[in-house]
Amino acid sequence: MKLRSMIVMVMVAVLVAACGGDGGETTDGGGGGGDDAGGGGVGSSVTLTAANFAFEPESLTAATGDSIEYMNEDDAEHNISAEEAGLDEDVEAGSSTTVDLADVEPGTYDFICKYHPDSMKGTLEVTE
């Protein structure tokens, strides 16, 4: 019986260690210093949600090299399109995508959902 208890305890310890993770998901690069001239560093991430046929938030600020985590909580396909920034990404209903800002020049850009432009519009400010 002792051997059986010991095996169960070892199995529980392994499961707890495997499921423990690192305590939370971090999406930023850690330092926030925007002086990465090499282009190989990890940028930060901002979140954009499509819900109830609206963007939340309607205004985003991110640096060149960052990314947008675009989550679609609606039952319809959505899109983020900012022609001047060269962005045009679809996201299926109930899914998400990552929009890379590595090639986007600093500036302020209007964005829309091409499928629902009357209710889904916002502003993206890209900094250095």
Image (tube, rainbow, N blue to C red):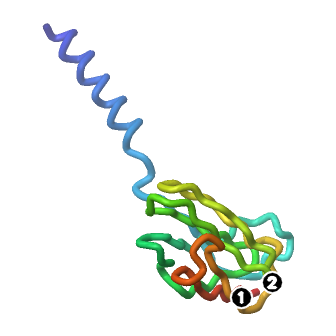
Q: Is residue 4 left or right of residue 97?
A: left
Query: Residue 29 location, x and y as percent?
Result: 63, 69
- Asked if residue 41 is positioned above or below residue 36 in the image, the reply reads above
Earlier sequence position, callout 1 versus callout 2:
2
Residue 111 placement: quadrant: bottom right
The N terminus - image quarter = top left
Assess whether mark 2 and mark 1 are in contact (beta carbons under 8 angstroms): yes
Amino acid type, mark 1: Tyr
Q: Which mark is residue 94?
A: none
- The residue identified by callout 2 is 84
- Asked if residue 93 is positioned above or below residue 37 in the image, the reply reads above
Nearer to us in this view, 54 or 48:
54
Q: Is residue 5 left or right of residue 54?
A: left
- Asked if residue 34 is positioned above or below residue 22 in the image, the reply reads below
Query: Residue 6 location, x and y as percent?
Result: 23, 17
Q: Is residue 77 left or right of residue 14?
A: right
Near mark 1 (Cα within 10 A), the count class, few <14, some 14-19 or many ≥20, is: some
Residue 36 placement: quadrant: bottom right
- The residue identified by callout 1 is 109
Residue depicted at x 82% and y 83%: 105
Query: Which residue is outermost to the right?
Result: 38
Amino acid type, mark 2: Glu
The C terminus - image quarter = bottom right
Residue depicted at x 60% and y 80%: 117
Residue depicted at x 43% and y 58%: 24
